[in-house]
Each structure stands twice: as structure tokens, then as C-alpha cells.
Amino acid sequence: MDPKCAVCEKTAYATERIMVNGKAYHKPCFRCTHCKSVLKPGNFTSNDGKVYCKTHYMQLFKVKGNYKSGFAEKVRQVRSNMTTLDQRYRIVGDVVLRGKASSSGLSKGKKVEIVYGNKKTTDFDTVSIIQSRQPLTPQSPYFVVEVYKCDPDAILAVGIAPLDLNTHTGQYNNSLGYHNNTGRVYTSWKVHANTLGLQYGKVYVTYFGEHLSTALLYYDNFPVATRYHFETSKERFFPTITFSGGRVEVGVLWPEAVEQLPAITDIPVSQWIRAPMGTYDAQTGFFENPSRLEDLPVQSPVPLGKSFRYFVVTQQEVSPTDGKGASVGLATYSPLKPTPTCTLMKDYYTWFAKMKMKVGNTIGWGVYYDDNCEDDKAEQLCLVYVMFNKLIVDVLFVLQPEGGFVPIVLLQPYATKVSIAKRNMLTADEITKLQGLYKQMLRPAIDIYRKDKAERDLPISLFRKSDQVLLNITDQSCRISIPKTENCIHYVQFRRPLTSERRFFFVELENISQQCQVTIGISPSDHALYEAPGFSDDTVGYNTYTGKFYSNRKDIGNMRGHRCQQGDTVGLEIETFDKEMSVVLFSKNFRPIGTRYITLRDHTQFYPTIFIENAGDPVELLVHWQTRVSVPPHYSVRNPEDWCLPEGTKIDLKDKFFILPQHYDRSLCLQAPYSLHKKYNHFEIVLADKFSDSEPPPAIALCTASPLDPPPTSQFKQDYLRFWPTGDAAKYLKQGDKIGWGVLFPQDEEGKAGKNNEQLIICYLTVNRTVGYVRVLYQPVGGLYPVVIAPPNVNRIRMDFSATRISTQDFTPEQIKTILADAKQQIEAEQQRPTKKSDFKTEKKNSIQPNNNLLINGHHSDMNSTTNYHSESNVPATKSAACIIL
């Protein structure tokens, strides 16, 4: 019988336990008694039956190396100092406060010196944390981190986080973090925004809102980025610094020690935030785009308001062909979470002149509030207006998010120079005009706002749930709570279906134990309450504990998924709706991780479902149902971070390498988030490393969202088309070559898509961007996804994203007609002869074995390998059909 964990007293199975001093522990339960950091068997010390990290053991017990003389008194003194520290800071891991700061109070202007990783025993793979227990407030909204030393491989993150943080700040729900190694700013896992940030910084909360707040980040006293902070509880705004990777020494001016706040209302235009490739010429006053990049941003660090009514941009260069200039508009501090459903609220507004512009033309944006407005940073209806050459030419009634709108300019390759001016005075005629427009447009705007609010309403009657599930629903959130109970199963189903307009919902795991299992999925109204979605027919689900995706009781597919823990966010999107079956795209922390088919044909039964096995522990989930999310996350197939990747994969963004975790006993797959289509019709990899028959290179494939079930019985309906350059095929390839798959969508077949007839597509293999093999297939539901397969000897994959959309000039109209005609003849012949099951035998021993009939440059290639490598999916081996060499 498996033993019980010495901490939680629950069963500790062999795969998840460690044995220490004759006791069993779950790996996550083996923690320092003092700081609660997770320990490893070789990096702990015990005393009186309790375990400690070596840092706190030294501080608590080993006083000056003397365990005898005056030991009790010295321990009492050290513990007294530690109590003072514990009241002021939360410290996890190898973080040490140097000097008198550990025992004396904070004083104005005095920095606290902090050292991380100063011991030989430091585990640089584990994140260490220090947090002030005094939260940021409107009176003390600012703290400063000065970096003294930082190893090249060190990661230092500065930000705001709750006290249950267990990773780098920003990479945790409702936390914000400014990371030194990349200069990125993460907020609730999200990194995309108009402003990028630089290495190191200072954090200033500029507005404390009711539902979200705004933060301004500095580098050497210059503003470099703006972000939203999505935590609603101001008591959880704890100043936070996290470390990993290498030794770091910093000096910190905590909020209570700050003598004077930066004057954010008086920031000059010359200090507006610009992208790293942008410049500012102090002599001319021009913001410039010397590299002629597209959409190079220049953003104000502060929003428009009563004391900053509008801004004006003068075009110093325009396109000589069509007179286009730099884009001028308004933006939010960063993308909103969730994406707003009200049509009055957007992340970004811009305006383009209908006539050709000239150098010297001006475009400005302003905001007008109701005369009774008391807080110009609160969420409210307001009027924004556009001024062209000093005249108000356009107005728009909008719903301003908390914090307000910031001015933004996007420089272009053809409009590389602008000058910017802040304005606050309007003429009497302009004010009269805006007042009239405000009154005229207010009533229709209120009607739109009320309609959206009604559609967002979540009456309790729309939920099917188990008895112990508690729902706390407000205008902004839906919280699922389960108190500490006996080990049992809980269930919540939202009885409004996912639709093509509202196709995405996500769940924030705010408080779950290590043993808790949360499954999110889709199931019909008659789904049994005791079964998780995915474990019955016509349902699909993602289990956060195992990390697996389930569809119709099976977990077969290219991607295995990722395990989740407290602080993560999981999401589900229906990416393709089809009458036979639809495609579900799962995400973790707003990154795609895998796809599955759902075979439920009745789309009115696509009910979001959450299934919870809480192991008796309390649970807190924050759910954003699809009726409150306007659009799902958008992924770029050119961005390596937006691919579905194996858990633990690292990315070299500069050289476009995927660094895979060790996988000695199996192959790993990488999958694009979307299938190939007209605007994304090709992908390729570079054979970056030397290869041989004993050390084969990666394989590339085109796959369906998940294996077809039952397996296809036609050679023109396949779920897996792959090429693996081994055997004779390897003779025609060398290190540095590029191999890829593309899809051509013949125009004659386009009209058949969406009707009862199926559309034929032409799949083609490219070697160094020359077509070497052609295969005709029926377009499967959801299309064919690019997949790269890494055998056990391959630990890195290099992608080339410069040819994701190519013009297949190798195919003439006559050749396309010939290819399709030949394929249709074979289809007709196939339909007339009886199908033998032996013709479509599944290759189980070598499931990534490539097509044996592949032709390259007119040569037959035997690509069997003497070594068995297993991929994640178990699918039929493909056969050659309509193979023509061009």
C-alpha cells in the first residue's frame, strides 16, 4: 500500500513522492517549515523533526557556528529579528538582506540592500522571492530597484503580486512583472502592448481603479512602459522582486522610504515612450523612425484628461505616392482582460484623412467629459474627437476604461518623422460644439451600454451545478468557490452555448491544491454530473492535473498538453464550427497548447463545463464566460511563442530555435495554432544539425486537429501526411537545407467548401522551396495543421518563418487541372471497388514512419528507419495518391 504524505496526510503515489528520513512526502509538500519554499532531497536540513531550507536553518539555529554557549539566548535573538523581518517581508529561497536593514525600520531615502544567490547551495533553477508586506497605496504608489550586480544568466523581475506568488511576478494571475533579461513587462501572463519596456526599472501605480489599475514603469528616470494591473483587491498590491538564473545584488527603495514621487503630470513630450528602434531629435523636436519599420509606436505615458485635453501631431514626412502619414490615435494602457464586449469600448482608435496629406498637416485627438464628471480616470461614457488642421472633423462616443486613454502615434516606413504637442485650451466655439454633440449622442450611447449589460447578465438560472458549488456573480466577475469538504466531485455548466460570435471562455485558477483536478470542456445539457467532459461521447475536456486533452474518452493527439497549478489560466476556444464535428483549441496562460475534435453536432448544446475533483480542499476559480469575452486571443504563426509546444520547451527568439526538454523514450511534436489556409499556406524547418540513419533529423507533417475516429477508409481522406528524410531520402538532403509542406486551394474547388460536396486540396512538399512531391486530399474539417516531429535524439528545432505565404508559381493552371483530373479518376475507381480493411492497416510500431512512396527529384526513396520512434498520435500510414513531379 502506498504511504501517506507526512504533510497533507493524503496518499503519496510512487511517481509523485519522495522519501526523506523514512517519511513520504508529495514533492510539492516538501517545504521549508519557515519560508514554505519547495525543497529538494539534497538541499535541506532538519531539526527536531522539522525540515528547513539551508538559508533559514543557518539563520534560526547555527548562530556563529556555536551550538553550545548561550545557544538558547542567541536563538531567541535571531528569532526575534526573524519575526521582525517576517512582519515586514515575505522571503522565499536564497534571498538575504544585508546590513542593518534586517533589524532596523525603514527610513526616508534609505535603500535596503538585497543579495540573491550568494551561496554555493543556491538552486538557480528555482525562483526566489522577496515581497514587502506593506501594499502599494494611493499615498505610497511607487518603489525603486537599483541594480548593483547581475550575472548574465540571471533573471530579475520587479512588479506587483499577491503573497501566494510562487514564480516570477507577472507570470502569475493578477500580477505584474518587469523582467530584466528581456525587458518585457508581463501582466497576468500577457506581454503584448504598444510599449515594450527596457531592462530593469521602477514601478509606479498611477491610478487605483475599482476593477483594474494602471502602472507606469521607469528606466533611469525615463518612462518606458504602461500596463494594466488586473488585481481588484488593493490589499494584494504587494511590491515584489523575484530572482533566478544567477547572482544578483540590488538596492531597494520601498514605498515607505520614497521621499518624493515623480511628477507624472508634467512629463514633457520629449520623454514620451518610444520603441527601442525609435529616436528623438532634441534640436528639431522630431520623433523619428530611422530603420523605416512599420507601426513603430510613440506613446504618451499619461492619459488625456481634464488637465490634458488633446494632443496634436504634425506630419513632417508623408508618402510621395498616396499622401499617407503616420497613424494617430488613442489606446488603452495595454490590452484589456477580458476583451470588452461593449461596442463602445475598444483597445485602440485611429483616424485617417480621406485626402492626400502634405508635410505640415496636423492630426489631433481629444476627449470631452460631461460637465459633472468628478473623476476623469474612472470608467465612463465620454466623447472623443479628431482635429485636422485645427478643426474638429470627427467625433465618437465611447466607453472609457478605468485609467483613461493614452495618445499614440505609429510611425511608418513612408512617414518617419513627426512632431508632437500637448494642448489644454479649447475655444468657446469648440466647447459649445462639443457640448451639443455630447447631448445629441448621449442617449443612443446609453442604449448601447444597457443592451450590452443585459447580454452580459448571468442569472443563477443559467447554471447547472452541484450543491456545494457557490457562485458569486457581479457585473465584472463570476467566482466559483468550494469550501473545504470531504473528497468529492463538483460540477458547473453554463447553459448558454459557445457560438461563432462568442467562442472563447477562460478560467483563472486562483486557489487550488496540488492534488486538485480541474477539467474545463464542452458538454451537452444531458451530460452526467459525475463525469468530466471528455470522458463521454460527444464531449471534450482539458484536465489541468494530468495536462491531457480528452475527446470521446480518448487522449490521443499530437500535443499532450500542459499541467497547471494555482496562478495559471486555462482557456477553450471553438476554432472551427462544422456540421459533422468542430475543432477546439485549448490554451494555457493565453498561449495555445493543443487541438481536439468535438463530435457533438448540435451546436446549441456547446455548453461550457467545469468539472472539479478538489481532494477535499477549498477551491477558488475566477471564470470569464464567453458572454463576457468579445474575441479569443489571436496568435501569429510567425511567432514561435504562439505555437503549441511540449511542456518545458524554451525558445531562442533571435535565431528561431525551439529548445526541447529531454525526451529519451518518445518523440515530441510541435504544432501551429492554426491550420494552413490561403493567407498561411506553407511552413518549413531548417535541418540545423548533422544527421544520419542512426541520428535522424526531425520529420514534418500535415495533420488534422486530432486523429479521425474511426480511421479514414479512403486514401484521399487522411489525417496525417508526413515526410521524414531518412534512408535514401537523406542522400538528397544535407545540413542547412529547408524542408516544408504547403497547401494549394484550387479555385475550381472553392465553391464546394461549406456545401455537401467536399473540397479537394493539393498538398505539396518543398525542398529548399522547390516542389518535390504532390498529394491530393479532401480538405478535412478544420484543415491541416503544420506539425514538426522531433525523434528522441533531436533536442532543438529551427523554423524559418520567412515563407509562410508563398506564390506557387511552379503550378500552372494546366498542371492544376491535370492533377485534379487524375485524382478524381482515382477517387471514382476507389469508390467502385470494395474496401479491404487490410489496405488501411495502422502502423503501430513506428507511428512516425514516413510515406514509403515519396519521390524527390524523380528518385524513389525508401525512408524506413531501423529504429522505432513513437509520436504522440496513432494514425494510419499514408499512401501515395496523384503523385506528380513538377
Image (spheres, rainbow, N blue to C red):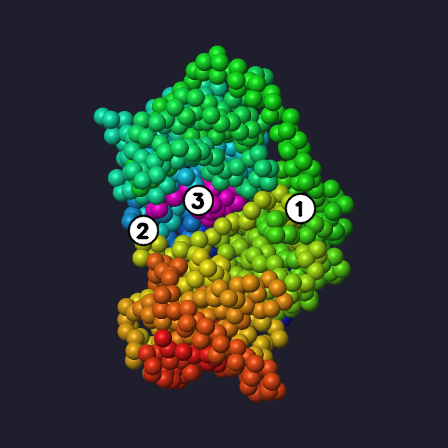
Reply above or below: 735 against 208.
below
In the image, which residues are magenta?
A: 164-192
Residue 531: % across, % down: 70, 62
User: Which circle's residue, 2 or 3, is located before the other in the chain?
Assistant: 2
Q: Would residue 173 be counted in the magenta stretch?
A: yes
Tell me whether the residue at label 1 lies in contact with that at label 3, contact meaning CB atoms closer than 8 angstroms: no
User: Which residue has dot 1 on it?
Assistant: 480
Residue 182: % across, % down: 35, 46
Q: Along the line of sight, which residue is nearer the eye, 394 or 68?
A: 394
Residue sitting at x 42%, y 34%? 354
- Separation of residues labelled 1 and 3 (CA atoms): 28 Å
User: Which residue has dot 2 on it?
Assistant: 153
* Image quarter hosting the C terminus: bottom left
Element on which disc 1 rests: strand
Residue 1: % across, % down: 63, 70
Would residue 519 be visible to someone looking at this image? no
User: Which circle's residue, 1 or 2, is located before the other in the chain?
Assistant: 2
Residue sitting at x 67%, y 46%? 481
- Could you tell me what secondary structure mostly forms the magenta stretch? loop
Would residue 429 be visible to someone looking at this image? yes
User: Which residue has dot 3 on it?
Assistant: 192
- Separation of residues labelled 2 and 3 (CA atoms): 24 Å
Picture quadrant of residue 840: bottom right
Residue lying farthest to the front in this orientation: 814
